[in-house]
Amino acid sequence: MRPGLARLLRRDGTEVGYGWAYLDETAKREVRRALLKAVAVPGHQVPFASREMPVARGWGSGGLQVTLSVITPDDVLKVIDQGADDSMNAAALRDLVSRTTGVRATTDAREATLIQTRHRVPEDDLHEGQVLVFQVPIADPLRVVDSRPSVTRRLHADRDYAAVWLYLYEDHARTGQSSFTHSHPVEVERGYVMSPTPIPRFDLPRLDRAPFLALFGAGREATVYAVPPYTRVEPLAFADRPFEPERFDGPCALCGAADTYLVEDDSAEEPRWVCSDTDHCRRRREAAR
Amino acid sequence: MSEVLRAEGLSVRYGPGCPACAAGLDGSACRACGSMWAIRDVSLDVEAGEVLGIVGESGSGKSTTLACLHLDLVPASGRVWLLGRDVTGVTGTARRRLRAETLGIVYQSADRSLELGVTAGGNVAARLFAAGWRSYGESRLRASELHAGMELPEERLDEPVERYSGGMRQRVQLARALATRPALLLLDEPTSGLDVSVQARILDLVRRVHRETGVAVVVVSHDLGVIRTLADRLLVMRHGRVVERGLTDQVLGDPQHPYSQLLVGSQL
């Protein structure tokens, strides 16, 4: 807010000058239609008319459009960036959604009904009725195989995924392991192969038959896709080269958790490994006190 | 003997077509409407374990015929049966499965069937993945088995094909084509552009593979030497039509059609 400009708020706390939830109703309806199709055909990439947003494309504009299209006044919102609620990007997106809808925001994944996330699944056990909105930089898992959408669309239509298997084969033949550290392609309900967005391999098992609804929005690529609750999500892996999530040498340096996804914290004197989910980590430390 | 492949009345036309097309063409073009008939009324059949040769000059429709048999092209008219099943016009998943399981193809230019940036083993394994193989160890074993069978050096299995010589690329193509033990092998000018000694060794290899696996083969070539070496029976094509057919020795020894006579007579 520029200094000197009075901030005009409605009685419900939302900003005057914008429609409810920022987007116009036609835009929201269009995104919802695309999402309905996406939910009906799990893992299938559905095009939508990605609008200009007040964040740059590639900075969560897709996730934001999905969030703004599905949010209701009763929702409780959580926004995370790589597991953190307080990063610049997460805070700005949360602020935008709150100010144009007036919905309550939280950092606690257990009480949130709508969670917009960049590249993580919260550590808490999520439950039915919750919606996760993933920000997607590259929607097509076949991009590594062929950069032409005209080609990859046909491959998806034919369920022709030999090229992805070849990619995995080449990894194993040349280096003895898979080179997917993130965005490891998954097969959704034995049908389409889908990119789970750059969430770490650690989070993939938690998408499988998960109770929550997962919506994926790629603003730059104007694509949405979805995984409905209790849908099978299986990482592609050879029968004799099983999929392996990341492993860590020790527990979180802050809360001592040994079952969470850790990231290197280089802001401390000595580099150390700490939980990527900051709120979960904070609650564990408070409970221990 | 059981029939592996049968094609009847295949025609491929580029252009609108018109009643005058049927009356007669100037070469393969219709004077009235300008349509090109790449092939016209081509019929053939291949029994299990048999090698059928197709010869003809450039533009005679050899490769177009092969493209119809490989299900790349849907003919304007005519039908194709593979292992007794009518496969005319199949597309999508059904075509992919058919190609992966029953058809193998070797092109003159290796980059049409191979990914040059991918290892030799990977190129072979890709066929197995297309046919539903999901074990790394088994796929690799089958790929290295074929690699050795094609007399390729074992230590180069994990080398990208772009570093292979022309003759070796043809061997990798052949390994790839045979990976899923297909019923029918299609060879489109498999040795053209290779030097004579390499040609001879590739042809020996094809003969050995054929003897060992009993795969039915359709080989297309403008080189009568290749056809004489490989084919049991022969079609001679010109302007998109089959002008003569018969046993290879018979056709090459005593050609009946003027064009066949010219072809045999003009061999260097």
Image (cartoon, coloured by chain):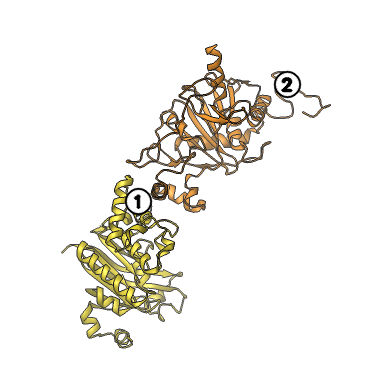
Chain colours: A orange, B yellow
Q: Which amino acid does label 2 sit on?
A: Arg
**Quick check: B55 above or below A233?**
below
Question: Can the viewer see residue B220?
Answer: yes
Looking at the picture, does residue B82 appear above or below residue A18? below
**Element assignment for label 2:** loop
Give the residue at x 35% y 41%.
A241
C-alpha span from label 2 to label 1: 59 Å
Q: Which residue lies under the disc numbered 2?
A: A10
**In-front residue for pair A30/A208:** A208
Given residues A8 and A27, the one toward you in this image is: A8
In which quadrant of the rendered view does residue A244 lie?
top left
Q: Disc 1 marks which amino acid?
A: Ala
Disc 1 residue crowd, few under 14, some 14–19, many 20+, Cα 10 Å = many
Image quarter where the C terminus of chain B lies is: bottom left
Task: Tell me: B142 left or right of A30.
Answer: left
Disc 1: which residue: B130
Whether residue A275 can be seen here: no
Q: In this view, does A28 lie above or below B108?
A: above
Chain of the residue that carries numbered disc 2 in the rendered image: A
Dot 1 falls on a residue whose secondary structure is: helix
> At 28% across and 71% down in the image, what residue appears?
B203
| Location of residue B16 in the rendering, given as x and y in whole percent from the top left corner | 45, 69
Q: Residue A46: x, y in percent?
A: 51, 41
